[in-house]
Amino acid sequence: MRFPYVLAILCALLLVAVVLLVLETRAVAELAGRNERLARAAQLECEAAVAQVEASSRELTATSGQLATTERERDAARAATERLEHELARAAAQVVQMTDAVKAAKARADASVAAAKAESMRALEPMPEGVRLCLQALHACLKADGFSDLRFLRARALDDNALHDVEMLQAADDRLGANLVVAKRMTAKLERSTGQLVLTFYEGTRNGDGERVELDESGWPLIVAPVSGHLIEERLPHLVECTGEYPSPEKQAAEVRPTDVDPVTRMQWLERFEVLLGEAGTTERLDVRRFRGMEQGHFLGAELLATDARGHVQFGAACERLAVEVDERAGIVSLVLRDGQLRRGLAESTITAEGYRILLPKLRPERASEIMLGLVVRK
């Protein structure tokens, strides 16, 4: 009887255990399910957190990149600013230098303008009377010796055997050009023994092959020879410095031909030729530049130059004999050249003893005789 009862108790205990086990299992299942849900939620939250962290990391990386970019841009901007400041400082220094240079240039220009204005005012001032008379005497002496191609335009002072602020024009042989000499000072030295006059120009310029060239520091000498020393020494005592001794009278007499004329006489006749040919009415302007002597109404060793209205040479001639020929019956006057050479351009022809005649159309025989004091040749 006890076994069934025990069995029943065991069964009841077993049943209770099963029930408890079931209940426990259900509780465990519920707990497992709840834990699984919690774990899943936690996983989701973890994944969200990871995603957020990754997003934050990416954002932080992007922000770091932006910050790095901004830093580089800031450094670049700082470097550019420093470079611009340096360039600005250099530009400011250049502006100051340019301003100083402009001021200096303006000062030089103002000084040049003032000097040019003063020089212009001085140029308008008349030459001192003593200087003017000296230049007149110098021109007369040069012309008397046949050097009419030298002409002094002006000078400002004469002292210590020198002319100051001199301008001299030397015409070319063909009259197509000229050498203009501008100098602060000019001296004149006469060598009596050789009849050589040396005009030396200092501190200035002259023409040289069509360009202005500076005069040498030692001066630029212009040699004029032969000249009549006695006339120059007599007319220009305050300008010309004389050296040496004149040749003996016997030597001078041996060198002088009977037909030669003295410089004063030569100058007087050249002036008469200037008046005569000025009234001649020829197409070209005729100029008897020089001659050596006179014989039986003829002028010996003469040179003639013909120029147009612009001063250009049309022809030139050098002849042994030149005369003013009048034909009273026909009422005409001619200039006759004999025994020489006629040059027209590059062509050169011979003038024979028969003569080469140049008609002086506006002159009448009586007027020509009057100007030439009767020293004419009648046809």
Image (cartoon, grey):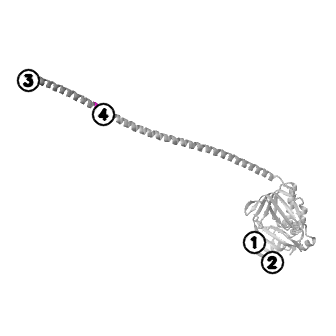
Distance from the alpha carbon under mark 1 to that under mark 2: 16 Å
Span highlighted in magenta in the image: 38-44
Residue identifier under label 3: 3
Query: Where 221 falls versus 339 (above or below)?
Result: above
Number of the front mark, 1 or 3: 3
Q: Does the rendering let one see residue 283? A: no
The amino acid at mark 3 is Phe
Sequence-wise, the earlier of marks 1 and 2 is: 1
* Residue 353 percent location from the top left of the image: 82, 78
Q: How crowded is mark 1: few (under 14 residues within 10 Å), some or many (20 or more)?
A: some
Number of the front mark, 4 or 3: 3
Identify the image quadrant of residue 370. Answer: bottom right
Q: Is mark 1 on a helix, strand or loop?
A: strand
Viewer-side residue, 15 vs 300: 15
Distance from the alpha carbon under mark 4 to that under mark 3: 56 Å
Distance from the alpha carbon under mark 1 to that under mark 4: 127 Å
Viewer-side residue, 1 vs 71: 1
Sequence-wise, the earlier of marks 4 and 3 is: 3
Q: Are marks 1 and 3 in contact (CB under 8 Å)?
A: no
Magenta stretch, main secondary structure, is helix
- Find out whether residue 102 is within the magenta segment: no
Quadrant containing the N terminus is top left
- Seen in the image, is 216 located left or right of residue 54? right
Going by the picture, which residue comes out furthest to the front?
2
